[in-house]
Amino acid sequence: MSQAAPTVDATRAGTFDAIQSALRRNTWTLGLLVFLAILLVFTRLIQPTYGATGIQGLANSVLPLALAATAQAIVVISGGIDLSIGSMMALTSVVAASNMQDQSDLFSVGVVIGVLLLGLLLGAVNGAVIVVTRVPDIVVTLAMAFVWSGCALLVLRTPGGGSAQWLEDLVLGPLGNEWIPKAGVVLVLIVAAIWIPVSRSRFGLSLYAIGSNQLAAFRSGVSVGRTKIFAYMLGGLFSALGGLALTASTGRGTPVPGPYTLLSVAAIVLGGVSLAGGRGGVFGPLIGVVILQLIRTDMTFLKLDPNLATVAQGLILIGVVMLGSLLQQRRSRA
Amino acid sequence: MTVTQTTDLLLEASGIAKTYGAVVALKSASLAVRPGEVHALMGANGAGKSTLVKILTGAVRPDSGTISVRGKPRVAHSPADARRGGIVSVYQEPALIPDLDVRSNLRLTETPLPNFRHWLDELGINGLDLGRLVREVPLATQRVIDLARALAIEPDVLMLDEMTAALPANLTERVLEVIGRQRGGDRSVIFISHRMIEIAAVCDRATVLREGETVGVVDVTPGSEERIVELMLGDIVQSMPGASRTAQDRNGAEPRLVVRDLTARTKLQGVSFELHPGEVLGVVALEGQGQDELFDILAGSDRPSGGEVRVDGKPVSFRHPADAIRAGLVYVAADRAEALLPQRSVRENIALPFVTRVRRWGPINLGREGKAVKGAIETLQIDTRAAREVRRLSGGNQQKVTIARWVASGIRTMLCFDPTRGIDIRTKNQIYVLLRDLAAEGAAVLIYTSELKEIQLVCDRVIVIFGGRVVGELDAANADEPALLRAAYNLKSDALMPEEIAAEVVAEAAAAAHPETDQ
Amino acid sequence: MRAVGVAEDRNPWLTAAAWRSLFRDRPVIPLLALLGLLVILFELGPSNVSSAWAGGVFRAAVPLAILAGCQTLAMLTGGIDLSVGAIASASGFVVATLVGTTGLPAAIVIVLVAAGVAGLVNGIGVGVFKVHPLIMTLGMSLVVLGLANVWQVQRVQTGAGVPPAFRTLGSDVFLTVIPYSLIVFVPVALLILLGLRRTGFGRLLYAIGDNPIAARLSGARSWQVILVLYVISAVLAGIAGFLIAGLTNVASVTLADSYVLPSVAAAVIGGTSIMGGRGGFGGTIVGALILTVITSLLSALGYPEAVRQILFGAIIVAVAAAYTRVTAES
């Protein structure tokens, strides 16, 4: 075979090929969407009353986890992992709740901005410690998970505080049509407003670059350490958003971290983000979150022990990763 | 030359030195590149080329020396820094991010798109879909993309480090043509290649490094290859005591190892040879001619795509290094990072093969183990003062540990891949003596070495590999360094294969390397 | 073992290199010094060091040390086992619910076999399918937790009670200092200590963690080692679960969750590298004691749980950074 073939091939790459390759690149995400659709139909079949209220509840319960998964996805794409996301959410949530209680709307806006800055700061600390000490990401973020949840307990010893009314109104209830939950709209707007510009920027490319091949990134002139810190800062920002979502949807702050760290890892793996870094996006994980939540809902409808949902989530996590590494082994052998 | 020469220089580096721990990579290297020339950087393996390149591109800082670009002193602290200073390099491994599409890779390095398109056309690749993921682009095309990207930035100095080594012939031709056209302008190219024909085709001058020093600058003209080889060789090699050794009479003895038509994808193309008990057989090759794959297959790390390997007359097929070890083939790697447990003790390192099988997982007989380890340490004269952690030993002692591991468990056939790379002369000699002793005791040794000078010290016979094929076989008596180097570069008239065929072999190899990616 | 090459002519106590090599080669010594310092602090500060206090510390440290032993084994190969918390909780809980119907010995055997199966699945995932140990064991902890919850719902009528034998073993103290849990701990600790130093399997754990390529080239099949490792780890976690149930006299499916991060911390503080190939169980035991003494010190001083968590986190980072520095280059 002549080695000129690929180059000739490349010349005919038109729009059709572009669409095709875009489809091929997003097969996993599309597959997830199809699976989600089937799951929704299935839900409707087993519970004919599942409708607008169901969607509403789904969106509300999904919001904090979706933001956690976005945070995790960004960090993992850059080649790291953040096990302190749940703790950062707890900390930001209690800081917001304890400062907003019985305060004016204007003040609470200030609190929200402060909490977001706090999220950036927490992420910056995580990233800087990793870059400076060269201790593996897993160890540092595991240790920081202690630190942040300890801080959360210092702020509020027991669940308490309160949320500004406008913040609750922002995420609870429908928007116009009863089928459109505010939580869903807020989620899409936040992620679109932050992730889309980032991923289109040179910084976003650097993020993928250091996760994909650090040597090539270094040789391409990317500052690996700085990019890594930025990735953790973004992770911190989305964790703070997740913390605010917790406060808004429950009306208070809870100092004990929820299961968000583990579930965020499960969601991104299900959403097609490679744990080796460099591959995936945030939209796959978002669908992954909805699927994980819907499975839990369906299990209640099926009168199954809801605890089996935890088992199912664990099995999905393991199964997807096993499948992924199996495919990779197959590919590298071929 | 005129007096004003120094101020005219585009890039000047002088007195560059760099040591890594105890290893001196560069003693005193200098390089002077004029505007508008294509300048070759030459040197045998380990002469310090790659270290010099790393220093010029900012990946490594020199211990001493000065570098100036267009008369202004400049030491790059990072590749980004070097890039801003006008030095851009292209490596054999493309510096492209595999998970990003081509367009994003260009944006990452802020490469002007029209320029890139222009150079891509010049290099013979038309209408590349910039939306394709780099991972999905054939490797050869990736290399050309990397080059076009570098050219598009219009750097003062473009450094090509072995970038043609794995290109198909037609692309190499285009690349050389484009590089050749850079001559006479304001910018320069530093060109590193193992292929003399390429040097002759595009280069104006060549700087030759040997043992970390610049030993000469040669104007490249027809026939200057001999002069370059001479400089690379250094002093005329004295005839070694080992050279008088002659092949023993092996009539009737069964060969320990028989390799027939061994093929590994495209890297090995039908290699055949025999290895007899009591023999040290040398393998000589330039970098990347298939010797890595050959040793990997024999050591059980890789599987051949065709051909046959027989050990003691029985055909074998290894799925794991454990299989090779059980068949009596033990492997000593050049890269000690591959062979050692750096944080473990000398004793644990040497005793590692004792415990690998499941039925040896139980309690260790410390007395017996201690005795075996002690014997091996004495045989190899390992300095055990820092025995608690192998990584604290000198390179030479580390290599001795990797050999001692097999000596302790008894050797039938040993595969040594460049066992003396980067270690001191005394240890080298000890290792050679040991190899001879092993052979004298009836073991068979297959050794690849980049130290051509020492082939005669240790080998009985030598095979030369080029482009995945055995292109020559020499007796130790004839295998002096000049002869070997010429054979390795496939230069000499007595070589089995003319240059053109060799180039074609390499081209086929590269083309077939990633056939699955072009659908 | 061959003696260290402390053949330096200068006074070895004054050189930075000597200190570095002390931390690098014998981390247990500075750790013991730290432990002593903490005990002195305790004596000077909040309360007097009494034999009852010591007994309490030992009693609390034993289950933590066993779980940290699981982490030590896994970390030596470059892995981590985050499923130990779920497995320990489930073991304690299931035995408590089974004991009424099957009797104690049978319940223990059933539970340890079940734990072993969970470990086997971990091992298959990590060793054969090359799933990242963190993900594999996290997933396994979700599965085990879920199954334990299901079991809880099924068994709610039977009721659960921690067997008296476990209570004695977990919380009673002999001669005011020696907890009965040492009856379990001493053999376990000896097995781990000797197993790591004197058996082929132990050598391979270090080898695989230090350099998997070298281990492979020497003929080791790492999947076999990893498989056995995670089974051992899960069984140890089950045993620790019994002790924790006895210590707290509670049977709950989330009982041991709060032990997971401290177990990693104890191993890291004890000098075991999460990158593999370095460390040992001796340091881990001291690490577990240090964490327990700190906890006791802080609670005696009236600091809230929050301060303990922050301190634990800071210690892990600081210690890991120090080890990274000391062991980075020779």
Image (cartoon, coloured by chain):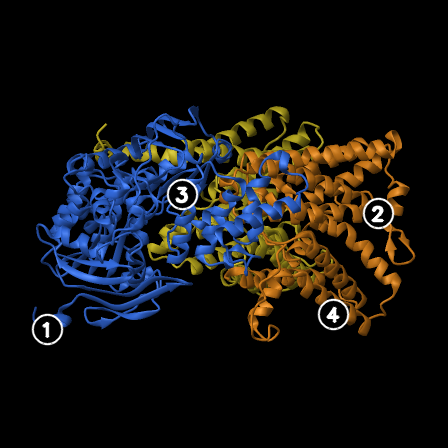
Chain colours: A yellow, B blue, C orange
What crowding class fits label 1: few (fewer than 14 Cα within 10 Å), some (14-19), or many (20 or more)?
A: few
Q: Residue at x 16, y 59 (%)?
A: B188
User: Residue under mark 1: which chain is it in?
Assistant: B
User: Residue under mark 4: which chain is it in?
Assistant: C
CA gap, disc 3 and disc 1: 51 Å
Looking at the picture, do discs 3 and 1 lie on one chain?
A: yes
User: Residue under mark 3: which chain is it in?
Assistant: B
What crowding class fits label 3: few (fewer than 14 Cα within 10 Å), some (14-19), or many (20 or more)?
A: many
Work out which quarter of the rendered image holds the N terminus of chain A and state it.
Answer: top left
Q: Residue at x 69, y 45 (%)?
A: C195
Q: Residue at x 64, y 60 (%)?
A: C313
Secondary structure of residue under mark 4: helix
CA gap, disc 3 and disc 2: 52 Å
**Residue indicated by mark 3:** B416
Work out which quarter of the rendered image holds the C terminus of chain A and state it.
Answer: top left
CA gap, disc 4 and disc 2: 28 Å
